[in-house]
Image (cartoon, rainbow, N blue to C red):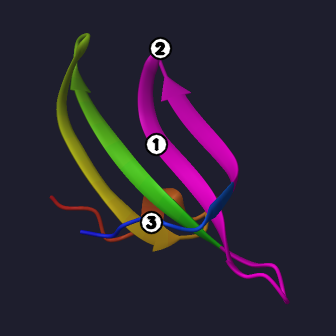
C-alpha cells in the first residue's frame, strides 16, 4: 500500500456514464524542482454498484489507462 503523505496540489476525476473510472492525486515530491507524480485509483462498476477499486498506482494522468491494472 502507498501512503500519500505529500502536499496535494491537484485532484482529477474521470467519469464514464456517470460512474467514476479514475481518481488521481498529484503531489509535490521535491519542493525545489516541483517534480510531480500522480497517484491513480481505478474503479470498476456493474450498473450503479462499485465492484472493484484498484490502486493507487504511480504514473502520469494522461497515461492512466495504460498503467498495470489487474485483470
Main SS, magenta region, reads strand
Left or right: 30 in relation to 63: right
Lower sequence index among marks 3 and 2:
2
* Magenta span of residues: 9-36
Residue 50 higher or lower than 68, as above or below: above
Local packing at callout 1 (Cα closer than 10 Å; few below 14, some 14-19, many 20+) is many
Left or right: 44 in relation to 63: left
> Residue 15 location, x and y as percent?
52, 27
Q: Secondary structure at mark 3?
A: helix
Tell me the quadrant of the picture where the N terminus can be found.
Answer: bottom left
Badge 1 is on which residue?
22
- How far, Cα to Cα, is label 2 from label 1? 12 Å
> Residue 55 location, x and y as percent?
30, 58
At x 56%, y 35%, the residue is 14
Front-most of residues 27 and 66: 27
- How far, Cα to Cα, is label 1 from label 3? 12 Å
Labelled pair 2, 1 in contact (Cβ < 8 Å) = no
At x 28%, y 62%, the residue is 69
> Residue 40 location, x and y as percent?
46, 57
Badge 2 is on which residue?
18
Labelled pair 3, 2 in contact (Cβ < 8 Å) = no
Mark 3 vs mark 2, foreground winner is 2
Numbered circle sitting on residue 66: 3
- How far, Cα to Cα, is label 3 from label 2? 22 Å
Residue 9 higher or lower than 12, as above or below: below
At x 54%, y 50%, the residue is 24
Local packing at callout 3 (Cα closer than 10 Å; few below 14, some 14-19, many 20+) is few
32 falls in the magenta region: yes
Front-most of residues 40 and 30: 30
Amino acid at each position: 500500500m502507498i501512503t500519500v503523505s505529500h502536499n496535494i496540489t491537484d485532484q482529477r476525476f474521470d467519469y464514464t456514464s456517470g460512474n467514476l473510472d479514475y481518481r488521481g492525486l498529484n503531489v509535490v515530491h521535491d519542493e525545489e524542482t516541483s517534480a510531480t507524480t500522480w497517484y491513480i485509483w481505478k474503479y470498476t462498476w456493474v450498473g450503479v454498484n462499485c465492484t472493484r477499486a484498484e490502486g493507487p498506482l504511480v504514473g502520469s494522468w494522461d497515461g492512466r489507462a495504460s498503467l498495470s491494472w489487474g485483470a
